[in-house]
Image (cartoon, rainbow, N blue to C red):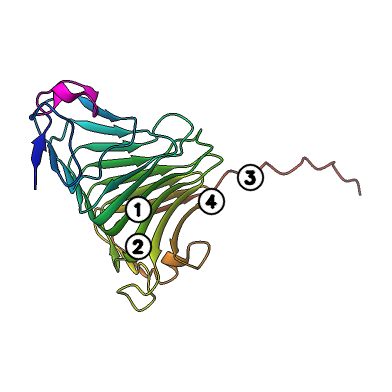
Amino acid sequence: MAAISWKSAVSGNWATLADWSTGAAPVAGAAVTIGVTGSYIVSVTTAIAAVDSITLSDAAATVAIAAPGVTEAITAGFTNSGTVTVDATGAGGTSVTIGTTLSNSGVLDIGNSGISKAATVTAKTLANTGTIDLTGGSAAATLDITGPSPASLTGDYVLRGDALVNFSSGGVSPSGGVTSIAGNSELVLDGAQSRVELSGAAGNSGLTGLSSNAGTLAVQLAPRSPPAARSPTTA
């Protein structure tokens, strides 16, 4: 397996050959590391080769993915200790598929309030101790986990607008979904279309078994209009 790394703490496009340690962009099957110390952005704006894995280990670095109409494929895992954005600006339409585990101890930001095409990240399993932020517009921002839901939700999840975290049904808990929110963890559902689902069941089906909260649960629906003023009555 070829190993390749981002060469220096300079922002650039994934397709820029000189920015990589080998002088060439990652090829299919490569193990990619973005770990040089510094604050910089690696932009992915076109289809890339199906690399084996990506490890973003520099906490100050960002991988910004915005390639409308493209599905970016990572055949094994994606480990993030920095910031990863998918369609954080623009109209959306980007998909990222991860063949095994998405491990997030940093920030994963999917979508924005202006997307009109779906922004989607798909992985087989999820290990989250960081922050996952999904923001939908007229189209959905989605994190689709094809494996089972964890019984206990760890890390922070902030869902705004049309935002979906989807787990497969038949999870490890008796309900098949989340039964608890762990200490120092947070789930924010900001809007009527923000939801945690089990596949094949609509609404917040992934939370129907939730019975224990040691962290934070916030449900913030759109504010209602104030009631109309009443005319005074006379005796």
- Tell me the SS state at disc 1: strand
**Residue 66 in magenta stretch:** no
Q: Position of residue 112 (x, y in %)?
A: 44, 35
The residue shown at (54%, 37%) is 116
Query: Answer yes or no: do the residues labelled 3 and 2 have beta carbons within 8 Å?
Result: no
The mark nearer the N terminus, 4 or 3, is 4
Q: Which residue is mark 1?
A: 122
Q: Which residue is mark 4?
A: 193
Q: Position of residue 121 (x, y in %)?
A: 36, 48
How far apart marks 1 and 4 lie (CA) works out to 19 Å
The mark nearer the N terminus, 1 or 3, is 1
How far apart marks 1 and 3 lie (CA) works out to 34 Å
Q: Is residue 192 visible?
A: yes
Report the disc number at residue 103: none
Label 2: few (<14), some (14–19) or many (≥20) C-alpha neighbours in 10 Å: some
How far apart marks 4 and 2 lie (CA) works out to 21 Å
The mark nearer the N terminus, 1 or 4, is 1
Q: Nearer the viewer, residue 143 or 153?
A: 143
Query: Answer yes or no: do the residues labelled 1 and 2 have beta carbons within 8 Å?
Result: yes
How far apart marks 4 and 3 lie (CA) works out to 15 Å
- Tell me which corner region of the image, top left, top right, bottom left or bottom right, holds residue 40: top left
Q: Which residue is mark 2?
A: 146
Query: Answer yes or no: do the residues labelled 4 and 2 have beta carbons within 8 Å?
Result: no
Highlighted range, magenta: 7-20
Q: Nearer the viewer, residue 53 or 152?
A: 53
Image vertical order of residue 127 relative to residue 161, above or below: below
Residue that lies at the very extreme toward the right in this rendered image: 235
Amino acid type, residue under disc 3 in the picture = Arg
Amino acid type, residue under disc 1 in the picture = Thr
